[in-house]
Every structure is written in structure tokens, then in C-alpha cells.
Image: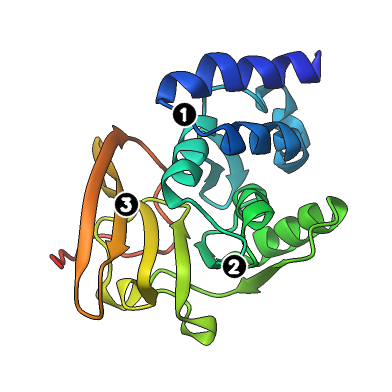
Amino acid sequence: MNVEKARFNMVEQQIRPWELVDADVQELLYAVKREEFVPSAYFALAFADTEIPLGHGATLPLPGLAARALQVLKVRKSDRVLEIGSGSGYMAALLAAHGERVWTVEIVPELVQLARDNLARQHITNVTVELGNGANGWPAHAPYNVIMVSGALPHLPKELLAQLKPGGRLFAVVGEGPAMTAQLVTRSGEEGFETDSLFETQLAPLVDGPRSERFVF
């Protein structure tokens, strides 16, 4: 495989049609090597427009989904970032490139170690991978400027939203298959939240996340 050609095709043919216009995000997709976060058995799919199994029910999301999330979250150098669902560490690496500090929470011990190993191999030092269930957030380091949920949720828990700073942004895929919607939630004040429904998509559910409860915020 010509890796750099495959990366170019991923960005130009798969991701840009997802309305990716942010030049900084495009450069980031070239800089952070997606193939370094893909299990060796699936290396041939590293740049494919598909979710990649990581084991334990987790997947590496579609390249376009990761890119669109970065574009709307607009991570800044001063931002404190929470990611829920570390997987292989790829999304945390992307967030860390623009943020000050990233905490990424993973419930599966084997994936915690995988993410730590992958991030260390890439010499990424501003990410902390923590073991636990982050479906309702991770109050230890709250509040956050940015929250990225890297697995689908049937609804957004109020505890999670409460951990956003005023002006903070949260990206999540909400719903249950086949009807899932990517959402950007912005905290407009101490009590106010604005939700933008961005596009329909599919994403594997967050491991051990909520399943059937309904909550309207």
C-alpha cells in the first residue's frame, strides 16, 4: 500500500465531501497518522470509509465523522478537553494537537492500555488516559471547554452537559440505530444550552453507556 497516497485519497475523496472546509483540520488529518492507531489485522482498512473494530464492542469511527467533529468543536490551544471512549487513542491525538490538555476516559482496561501505548509511541504528552465509565462525564477535571463523545448515546445525560463551561462545546452522536444524529451542544450560559443537529450518521454505541432511558434537556 502507498500509505501517503491512501491518506491523500482519504482526505480529498472521502472527507472533503463531508463539507470539511477547515484547512487546519485538513492539515491535522495528514499530521496525525491514522494507521498508527489501527489494529494490525485491519491495517488495509486504515483509510477506508468504514468503522474499524477495536475489540470489546468499540470501533474507530469513520474518518469523516472525526473530521466533522473537529471542525465544529473548534478546539483552541487554551481548551481543556474531555473525550469519552478512548478506543485506540486516535481521536484523543487529534484533539490534543489543538487543545491544551485532553483527558480521555475508557471503560475497557485493554483499550486503556492500547490507547496509552499508541499515544506514547507518537510522543503525545498532553493526553491522560483514565480507566472508568464516562457516560455521565468525568467530574474529576471538570469543567471542560470541549467534550467529545466517541460512541453513540441514546440521549445526552444532564450530568454530562453540566460539566461544560459556559461557551463550551460538546459533540455527540445521539439516538439509536438506524436513526442517529450528530449534534453540537453549546453552553450559552449557566442554565442555557443550544443544540444544533448537524447530520444523520451511524456510530457504534458507547461501551456500557445508557441504553433505554429518555431524557430531554
Dot 1, how many residues are within 10 Å of its Cα: few (below 14), some (14-19), or many (20+)? many
Where is residue 194 drawn, in percent x and y?
21, 59
Tell me whether circle 1 and circle 3 mark residues in contact (CB < 8 Å).
no
Is 97 drawn above or below residue 213 in the view shown?
above
What's the amino acid at mark 1?
Answer: Leu
For this view, does 76 lie left or right of residue 210? Answer: right
What's the amino acid at mark 3?
Answer: Leu
What's the amino acid at mark 2?
Answer: Ser
Is 144 drawn above or below residue 50 in the view shown?
below
Where is residue 75 drawn, in percent x and y?
53, 55
User: What residue is shown at x 38% (from left), y 53% (from top)?
Assistant: 171
> Can you identify the residue that label 1 sits on?
20
Whole-number angstrom distance, CA of label 1 to CA of label 3: 16 Å
> Can you identify the residue that label 2 sits on?
78
- The local secondary structure at tag 1 comes to loop
Please report whichever mark, 1 or 3, sits nearer to the chain's N-terminal start. 1
User: What residue is shown at x 68% (from left), y 18% (from top)?
Assistant: 8
For this view, does 17 lie left or right of residue 112? Answer: left
Residue 154 visible within the image: yes
